[in-house]
Image (tube, rainbow, N blue to C red):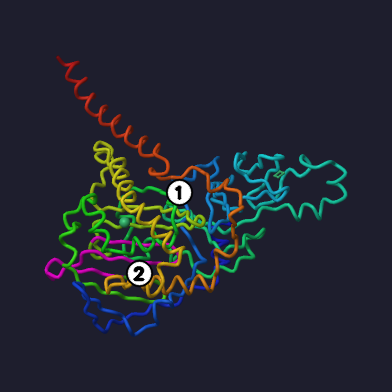
Amino acid sequence: MNDEELNKVNSLKLANQSSGNASLEQTSGITIEENTSVQPADQLSSGLFGWYAACSSNTLKSGSLWHLSMYNEPLILYRDKDNLARCIKDLCPHRGASFIGGDIKGGELVCPYHGARYSSKGECTNLDRITCQHIVDSNYNSYAKKIHLYQYPTIEKDGYIFIYYNGQAKTNLQDFDIQSSIEDSRTDSYGFQSAKYKFEEVCVDFKCDWARIIENHLDILHIFWVHGDTIPDKDVSRDVITSFNQKITRDQRQIESKYNHKDKSKGEFISIKFIPPGRIVIYKGSPESARYVQVLDHIPLAENRARVIVRHYRKFLKNKFLTKLIIFKELQQRIFYRVFSEDYMILKTQTFNQQMGYIEKDNVKLLGEDKMVQYYWGWLNNALKKDNPWGMHPTTSGTNSVHRDMKMRYPPENPKLADENNSKIIRKLLTRLLIPVGFLFLIF
Ligand code: FES
Ligand SMILES: [Fe+2]
């Protein structure tokens, strides 16, 4: 499905945003100004089904398969012969094999079991090669109709591959009733012009509940406490936590929390937006003039398994040569890995506590500062009830662990990733040092 086809299918735009700020609530250290003139937080118009940024464009190379899952359902992303991204359920409609170990030939997906090839539309293109001639002849029409890939709408924007996920892959993409416009998921629709920025990104997998990571990224309190020594920003330390005013606004599209310095001359410190189903945008300074912006996409791979694509847009250090010279990408990646590692044990154990039912209403007491998390919970609980995504592809304790056992993209689970990055840093540092030394050696 290309952009044009997809836009035809897109039927419903999200309702207009509303605004208006009113009452003040005083809490420990932070003042909360709340938007009361609109519907409550649980009336964000999107639920858990919709457009997910599932993979970055750079990651999806043509000729290779990218495996992921959504709410336990195994999926595959690949590029077809026109280089368009496709998302299919990882299930060959011949005998139900997975495409793991399969191939792309001439932009067509090839099953590793009996070699069935599928066009980008999902039709099997070599039926006669995988069945006996008499079967093809007598049953061709009915069989050909049955052998068709199960797909999800896919679109590529802003260097992301978005998939429209609703738990029900279909053989015909036209059959999807798409409830939200992809335009609302464009980075430019959040108040900053991404073209003016450069970015670095990493993709990491966590063994914890998807919602706990989103919560973690909405939670400013912990940034100072847990990451104060790692984030290279003088404003982020355990000592500055009480010096902000918080203002929360909610509308049908997003929940936003702005933190202003108590000293008004210093202006806005940070703002955080939650845009369902899985995106968080964090600005340093106001969105229009932010020096850097973080876009975090959260992908609910499976129970106890979530993926985050974190992209760090910056307005500074845009010169490509300089960035390469100072090994910026790898050093940035190192910081990302370290920041996420600082959260990891907290997230895993908090997931356990939540699964045991310990994080119930009366067991935990939220602070005023946790209002953002509270609003998120409100939305999540309603969305879980309405969409029930975890109920669509449930696994049991007896389910084969093949997908759970896949290599994770995260150093604490897969130390090779950090080792590779560190050796890249050392190698590049040495080359940068050796070139001038060699040059001097030649001269003298
Ligand atoms: S299961 Fe895929 S070709 Fe047979
Ligand atoms: Fe964190």
Q: Earlier in the sequence, mark 2 or mark 1?
A: 1
Identify the image quadrant of the N terminus: bottom right
User: Can residue 82 be seen in this snapshot?
Assistant: no
Ligand 2 has an atom within 8 Å of the beta carbon of the residue at disc 1: no
In the image, taking residue 433 as reference, residue 159 lies left or right, namely right
SS state under label 2: helix
**Residue closest to the eye, 215 or 117:** 215
Q: Amino acid at mark 1?
A: Ser
**Percent x, y of residue 252:** 41, 76
Instruction: Specify the quadrant of the image occupied by residue 8.
Output: bottom right
* Placement of 161 over or under 383, stated as above or below: above
**Residue ID at (55%, 43%):** 65
Of 186 and 353, the residue lying toward us: 353
Few, some or many C-alpha atoms within 10 Å of disc 2 (few <14, some 14-19, many ≥20)? many
Q: Which residue is mark 2?
A: 373
* Residue drawn at point x = 33 percent, y = 83 percent: 36
In terms of secondary structure, where does tag 1 sit?
loop
Measured from the top left, where is residue 322 in percent x and y? 24, 39
Question: In this rendering, is residue 195 above or below 418?
Answer: below
Residue 289 as seen in the image, left or right of residue 96: left
What label sits on residue 77 in the rendered view?
Answer: none
Q: What's the magenta region?
A: 257-284
**Which quarter of the rendered picture does the C terminus lie within?**
top left
